[in-house]
Amino acid sequence: MEQDTAHFKPSRITDLIALKKGGASVTCQVSFEILPVEFAHRKNPFQAHIFLCRYECTTDGRDFSFRKCYARGCSHNLCPHVSQAVMIANRYLQRDYHKLEQAGIEIEKHLFTLEEMMVKFNGYQEEHGPVLAIHDYINIAKEGNEVAVDMDLEFVPGVEHFANYENQMIFMMVDFAVSCLGKTHHYERCLACYPMEKEKEEKLQKIEIANERLKLLYEEFDQAAIKYERVFFD
């Protein structure tokens, strides 16, 4: 059954795939932004960089765009290190490219680059160990190891700094505390965000998007026999 694209605005990768499977013509291009953001985290402000990908899409002749946050990085211990974040962002970006290709949606592949900062932080990975994302822990569980995950969901305000203006945003963050192989590791993801000034118009939709992404992740947790309790944004 074909999707009614006249009344449907894609806002995530899953939507594009559903449109394609429903018979729609879908084309897509990507562009990147690495933005400095001032976060007010538990009343302790700090600055970080967020890695955003904007998807410019055409479905049956209609143009749409949406953006997705792939990582957040900073130079202290309040979030993943910048050198880790750029690699995590690219790994999840490549997963999305693969999903789009599997659905028959052609896309020109580009990756995040942060050459100056990568040079500045050269050697960080060797000192602090390899970069692990949540799906690495899922694979560890699939190999027969016991893995448990505790999740802390939070609405985090932040100010995005562009060249000539600022955006006050709310970021829907999840902190994963992953216990496996005798250690506990912290890993975080942003599942959605919206402008503070449009909270009434967009908050409920973004909550739905974030919770749908959590549901997909929980399905993978179940398949890998990971111990966890389901939590959702509300």
Image: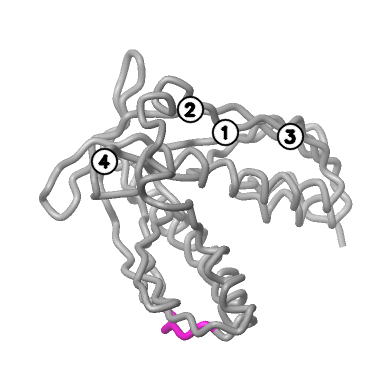
Q: CA distance from mark 2 to mark 1?
A: 8 Å
The mark that comes first in sequence, 3 or 2, is 3
State yes or no: discs 3 and 2 in contact (Cβ < 8 Å): no
* Residue drawn at 47 percent across, 56 percent down: 205
Q: Is residue 56 magenta?
A: no
Residues shaded magenta: 226-230
Q: Is residue 190 visible?
A: yes
* Residue drawn at 40 percent across, 36 percent down: 123
Q: CA distance from mark 3 to mark 4?
A: 29 Å
Specify whether 155 is left or right of 191.
Answer: left
Amino acid on which the number 2 mark rests in the picture: Glu
- Above or below residue 216? Residue 99 is above
Image disc number at residue 33: 2
State yes or no: discs 1 and 4 in contact (Cβ < 8 Å): no
| Residue bearing mark 1 | 54
Amino acid on which the number 1 mark rests in the picture: Arg
Image disc number at residue 135: none
Provide residue 30's location: percent of width, then percent of height: 65, 30
Image disc number at residue 158: 4
State yes or no: discs 3 and 1 in contact (Cβ < 8 Å): no
Mark 1 lies on a secondary structure that is strand
* Residue drawn at 44 percent across, 42 percent down: 85
Amino acid on which the number 4 mark rests in the picture: Gly
- Above or below residue 43? Residue 175 is below
Viewer-closest of 194 and 118: 118
